Image (cartoon, coloured by chain):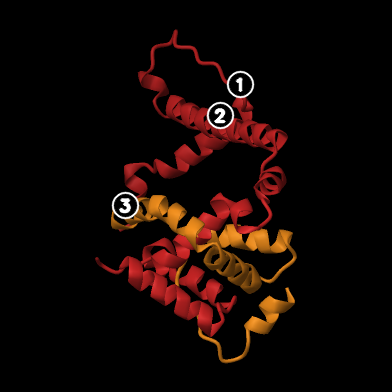
Amino acid sequence: MENINLNEFLSNEEVAALEKFSQVIPADLMQEIKTAAKAKDISIELETLSRFLATFMEPQQFGLKSNIEKILKQNFSTNDAVAECKRNRQHWLYVYEVEKLRLFLAFENKIPRNFKEKFISIDVKAESKRILAELKKSQKPWGDAED
Amino acid sequence: MKIIRELTQKGDPMLRIKLPKNVISLLHTLSKQNKRRYQDEMIKRLAASFRQNDKTILLQAELIPQLQKIYHA
């Protein structure tokens, strides 16, 4: 069996950050890991990782505390999730509408006159001014081109 | 805690492995919650897995094939 390389999971910066926490372990524990990995014909990385995951999955079987509920409560309550969804939705709606308005203004001549569009999350007048100024800057007349 | 600190003596070997980001992050969170150092959390978990080796081997039988699939994919 090939040795499994876990490098792909971490960038160089992350590896450097990891070096801060020196992974010094007792010699006999290291020896046990090596022996167990050899017996199963797998790499030390995989042996260690599977042992960590086993303790995460069934902490009580190993006499460890189950902290997963605490972690879930701390990191991600329902209210946080709802607020995050709202923020995301608002942000993407704004981005979408600005892009829509940009297209509308750029191709105004080619769009039928009876075409109507609703905008909910942006101030159309202010954004139109800003976008038209941007479009003018980007569309220089042919004669002004520098040699 | 005392035992763990006694075990981590100067000159002991480095476990030079690169763990996936989410595992490191979870270890950090757990070490903060249990008021231990990252290193102590790691050693406590590894030592516990060897104390209950039979249970670990049963869980590993499920985990290792899945991990191998992920790493070889």
Residue B37: give x, y in percent of width and height: 68, 71
Q: Nearer the viewer, residue A36 or A66?
A: A36
Query: Real-space Cα distance between discs 1 and 2?
Result: 8 Å
Mark closer to the chain start, 1 or 2: 2
Q: Residues within 10 Å of mark 2 (few under 14, many from 20)?
A: some
Q: Chain of mark 3?
A: B
Q: Nearer the viewer, mark 1 or mark 2?
A: 2
Q: Residues within 10 Å of mark 3 (few under 14, many from 20)?
A: few
Chain A drawn colour: red
Residue A123: give x, y in percent of width and height: 64, 27
Are the residues flagged by discs 1 and 2 in contact, CB closer than 8 Å? yes
Please identify the quarter of the rendering in which residue A1 is found.
Answer: bottom left
Q: Going by the picture, which residue comes out furthest to the bottom?
A: B11
| Residue tagged 1 | A120
Q: Residue at x 61, y 28 (%)?
A: A122
**What number is the disc on residue A93?**
2
Q: Nearer the viewer, residue A92 or B53?
A: B53
Q: Chain of mark 2?
A: A
Residue A131: give x, y in percent of width and height: 52, 35
Please identify the quarter of the rendering in which residue B4 is found.
Answer: bottom right
Q: Amino acid at mark 3?
A: Lys
Residue A70: give x, y in percent of width and height: 71, 47
Quarter the C terminus of chain A occupies: bottom left
Q: Amino acid at mark 1?
A: Ile
Query: Real-space Cα distance between discs 1 and 3?
Result: 47 Å
Is residue A43 shown to the viewer in this render? no
Q: Residues within 10 Å of mark 1 (few under 14, many from 20)?
A: few
> Do the residues marked 1 and 3 share a common chain?
no
Chain B drawn colour: orange
Q: Residue at x 68, y 47 (%)?
A: A75
| Residue tagged 3 | B69
